[in-house]
Image (cartoon, rainbow, N blue to C red):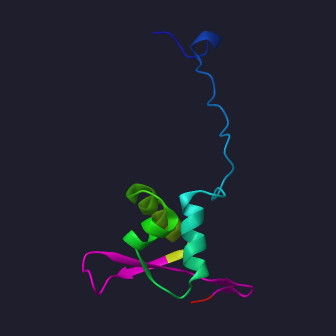
Amino acid sequence: ISSLSSPAEIPPPWPANPFPKGIRPGSVTDKVRAVTLSAHPKWFEHNELMRLCGGSRGAIAWAVRYLQHHGLLRSIESVKRPGYRRYQAVSVTTEGVSE
């Protein structure tokens, strides 16, 4: 049994991520955040976000999930369409987060 201590058997390190952390300007996530913030306190359904942001179903789903995870978006069940969600930006003030 050989050991992994020889230099030929040690795998090279992963390359550094070329993209900055956070929301990239111009991305669908950035557009969802901008649209929901600009119309705060309006609630949006998924199809409205697709139309307004120009993103695919999957891109919008990823954006709302990411924004919710970071506390920038909240959701409730749609009254008009049970089983679907509605989304609203969480507005950020100088004192912190406001409803």
Q: Decide whether residue 90 is among the magenta residues.
A: yes
Relative vertical location of residue 50 with respect to residue 98 in this rendering, above or below? above
Name the residue rendered at 54%, 77% in the picture: 36
* Quadrant housing residue 92: bottom right
Q: Nearer the viewer, residue 92 or 47?
A: 47
Q: Position of residue 17 (x, y in %)?
A: 65, 40
Residue at 61% across, 89% down: 98
Which quarter of the rendering shows the N terminus? top left
Quadrant in the picture for residue 34: bottom right
Q: Which residues are magenta?
A: 74-97
Q: In the drawing, does residue 67 fall left or right of residue 57?
A: right
Left or right: 8 with respect to 78? right
Viewer-nearest residue: 68 or 25? 25
Q: Residue furthest left?
A: 82
User: Is 14 located above or below residue 67 in the figure?
Assistant: above
In the image: residue 31, left or right of residue 19: left
**Residue 23 quadrant:** bottom right
Taking the spot 64% from the left edge, 55% from the top edge, the residue there is: 24
Q: What is the x, y in percent for residue 16?
A: 67, 36
How many marks the image carries: the answer is 0
In the image, residue 64 sits, relative to residue 12, either above or below, namely: below
Residue 11 image position (x, y, % from top left): 58, 21
Q: Position of residue 14 (x, y in %)?
A: 61, 31
Q: Answer whether residue 31 is magenta in the image.
A: no
**Where the C terminus falls, by quadrant?**
bottom right
Which residue is drawn at the image coordinates 30% and 75% (left, top)? 84
